[in-house]
Image (cartoon, coloured by chain):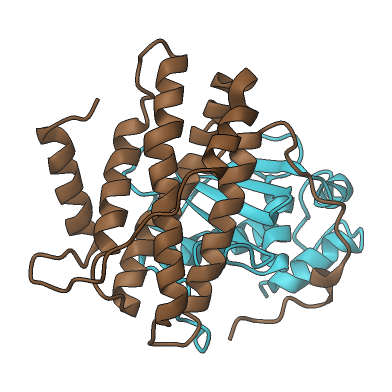
Amino acid sequence: MPQSLEQIVAAYQAGATSHASGKPLAEGAAALWAGTAATGQVGTVLLRDSARRQWGLDVRRDHRGRYLQLRPIGIDIERFRASADGHRPAEWLPITPLEWTACALYAGGAHGPEGHAEDEELGREVRRLLDRMVRDAQHGRLVFDEDED
Amino acid sequence: MRRSPGKLAGRRTPPPERPTACPITRYLTEDHDRLDALLQRALSRQGEVELESFGTFRAGLLRPIGMEEKLLLPAARQARGGEVLPIARRLRIDHGAITSLLVPTPTPEIAAELRSILGPHNVVEEEPGGLYETCDALLAGQAEELVERLGAYPSVKVNRYQDGPNVHRTAASALATSARQFDRRPPF
């Protein structure tokens, strides 16, 4: 049974070696968890959304709080940002701190541009988040959606 | 409603990393923060635009556009020996389109169109290696002095809203017209 985002992140926080589903966490899980408290550029990774468009995902934490910056690769779509701390709510997409943490785990540490794909549960949730952010960014769903979702 | 972030979300975070050596970035990014708060306030009631906050946002947004066009980009060009920054064309077209969308009486739909330009535009200006960081690097010795000039830049006098048939109400039409105007008579 697929793990929820909260279960996935909790497994890292608890220092587990595998999810309750039996699937392994990413390599170096403890270091990845520690890395989520870093400042500056926490990690960067290349991802494809469900339409097979490639995105560069930068996971950052600085004076603006925890946020993601998404850059389309080789496609004519605009860049956008998403904040886990309510920064610039009229302009940046909202995400939850849990979602930011999942991205920080997936993109953190030393790895190839594909991120920690060895954790299938984490990868699935990060790609799901990417799809939602891309959809929201393209449809301007930033301010008037408080009663939805 | 968005789902609750849960208890993991509440854990303490380290002290934030603040830029200290980039006065242009800091000044203009903080101005963007202030403008975003005004826009958020103007749009805080679903399906409405609160005109007083939007009016302050509108005037406030035109001022940094003026600062960038009149002070920042010319200073960067001078620092590059007269060579225009590669990003200048895009910024000029965005500025023209943003200004166009501030002409009609605001509606939630027009505000959404405006935000669809502002979001990516501000990324291009604020991101690592973007306009502001580039200008901080190019103008290193004069950056503080430039920030003083930015601070002294006058408020922009705004006209009343106009709602005629030729007024732009979508980002696509505003951007297309702004690009055509740029290409017909390149300002640099």
Q: Depth check: give the residue in front, B60 or A7.
A: B60
Placement of B35 over or under B153, stated as above or below: below
For residue A81, side relative to residue B114 (left or right): right
Q: Depth check: give the residue in front, B118 or B30.
A: B30
Q: At x 61% / y 44%, what residue is drawn?
A: B27
From where the camera sits, is residue A92 visible? no
Placement of B101 over or under A143, stated as above or below: above
x and y percent of residue A131 in the render? 47, 62
Which chain: brown?
B
Q: At x 70% / y 35%, what residue is drawn?
A: A111
Farthest residue to the right: give it.
A15
Q: Quadrant of the C terminus of chain B?
A: top left
What colour denotes chain A? cyan
Q: Quadrant of the N terminus of chain B?
A: bottom right
Q: At x 39% / y 50%, what residue is drawn?
A: A52
x and y percent of residue B127 in the render? 55, 40
From where the camera sits, is residue B84 visible? yes
Q: Depth check: give the residue in front, B155 or A139.
A: B155
x and y percent of residue A83 in the render? 62, 61
Q: Depth check: give the residue in front, B95 or A81.
A: B95
- Residue A94 sits in which quadrant? bottom right
Number of labels in the image equals 0
x and y percent of residue A69 in the render? 56, 49
Q: At x 38% / y 35%, what residue is drawn?
A: B70
